[in-house]
Image (spheres, rainbow, N blue to C red):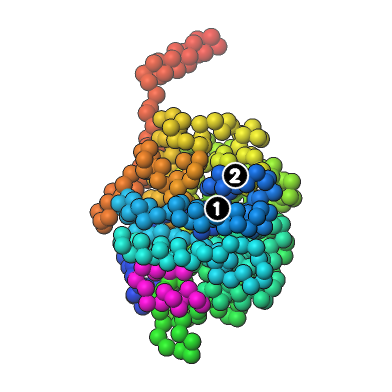
Amino acid sequence: MGLIALYTVLLFAFTLFAVTSGFNYDQDTIRGVNLGGWLVLEPWITPSLFDNTGNSNIVDEYTFCLNQPIQNATDALWKHWDRWITEEDFKEIAEAGLNHVRLPIGYWAFDTSADEPYVMGQVVYLEKAVAWAGNHGLKVIIDLHGVPGSQNGFDNSGQKTSDPSWYRSQLNVDRARAIIQRLANTYKDSTVVTAISVMNEPAPQNTRDPDGMLAVTRQNPLEYWYDTYQDVRHPTKGGGSQSNTMLVVSDAFKGLGYWKDSNLLTLPDYEGVIVDIHRYQMFEDEVSAIWGEISLNDEQIVTCRCQALRRTNDQHLDFACSQGAELRNSTLWVVVGEWTPAATDCAKYLNSRNVDSRYSDQGYGDCARLTGSALLFDEGYKAFLARHWEAQASTFEQYAKGWIQWTWKTEIADEWSYKAGLKYGWIKRIERSANSSYPNPQFCANRVRATSSAPGRSPLYYAALIFLVIFVFCTFL
């Protein structure tokens, strides 16, 4: 066993040093933030864009472009792209001590050849983002957030649907792969774009044909994960040297143990691979239901058991600290590419437009002062956000390659916003040095010690106990 373990370690080390990207993923920690809601609309991040249409049937970017005059959609989107994220944001992100941005973008920025109704133009801002990141010493992970037909049916895939069909159409698979090839060739020599995430959160909707989705993504070397590995790591057709662009693949909500058992893109044949996992406590039941691990029908998905929403603040912290057990057992590099200090689904439209919060509607608690402007948050709630943020960030740094919080900014959900966290104090500026003490690597260990060394009983307690024993003894003697 010792020789096998040594061989595995040596192979892993070889892989780390074989890829020399613009960021030292071997030695340095990923600390980043997502630019959510910019080049892919999400109703909860910018609810005003949707409310201003006056049309409740507009629930995602697909219907945003389909169900209103196209000129209205075009004008609104170009104004949004121009103002929501600017170079000033990149400057602030760098000044906060972060080193990465993850940039979601949809397939429709590159290809609407199947007559999809989307407005194009996002590539202009992708190019600006890469330039701005370079100006401020940030690295970019380009994330293909939505693919043709939708890979999960979520509104953040571009099209909310109960029947995501990407994996059932070879044409759709080929279209997605062509976009990855284009990105890989464009940025193969870049020291700013250091990684490409080839598809965000693939998942069947409510256990519809889960085996089919998994087969397309990973079951054999002819399928999407393996094909896009070749596209990203070896972008020059006909052979040639490999690129230094990292490949990022989603765990598809299956957990790291599943992919470890599946030998996904393992050494020594594959190198420069990062597995991206997303951790949102408020959505645990839905994630389990996606793959049939618990049985929930469509109605129950909306009115689910929501065990995580029942947790106390201390239980949320305990859960955050417990995640190291899974992270440290991965055979591949891991980044927690989406997570949040928020613990509820109180944010407006978080569960999709026109769907209310389960936290308040099902009686788990009152959403008042748990979402919206941080000016309304009391000191106790901000202190919890600070602890919850540090519990997660420290765990992800200790047991994975790092983290990328969702998201940089929101219109009216400050509990999710890194920018608001900096402004109102539940997130601190991080020192860019190996000796940085924030987030505290001992946060969870200190928490355990504090819990296990609670103050002892007072002398009055023991005096009362002795008196009780004497009383009982004398009474029954």
Q: Residue at x 66, y 50 (%)?
A: 58
SS for tag 1? helix
Q: Residues within 10 Å of mark 1 (few under 14, many from 20)?
A: some
In the shown orientation, is residue 135 left or right of residue 118?
A: left
| Residue 101 is at least partly visible in this image | yes
The residue positioned farthest toward the front in the image shown: 71
Q: Is residue 187 magenta?
A: yes
| Residue 349 percent location from the top left of the image | 60, 44
Q: Nearer the viewer, residue 368 or 2?
A: 368
| Label 2 element class | loop
Q: Looking at this view, name the residue that lies furthest to the top.
A: 475
Residue 262 seen: no
Q: Which residue is mark 1?
A: 76
Q: Which mark is residue 52?
A: 2
Residue 476, percent from left and from top: 55, 11
Observer-nearest of 220 and 223: 223
Residue at image coords 34%, 67%: 23
Label placed on residue 178: none
Give the amino acid type for the residue marked by disc 2 in the picture. Answer: Asn
Report the magenta residues as a range.
181-196
Q: Position of residue 470 (x, y in %)?
A: 46, 13
Q: Residue at x 74, y 50 (%)?
A: 297
Marks 1/2 in contact by CB < 8 Å: the verdict is yes
Mark 2: give few (<14), some (14-19) or many (20+) Cα within 10 Å.
few
Residue at horizontal 60%, vertical 81%?
Answer: 222
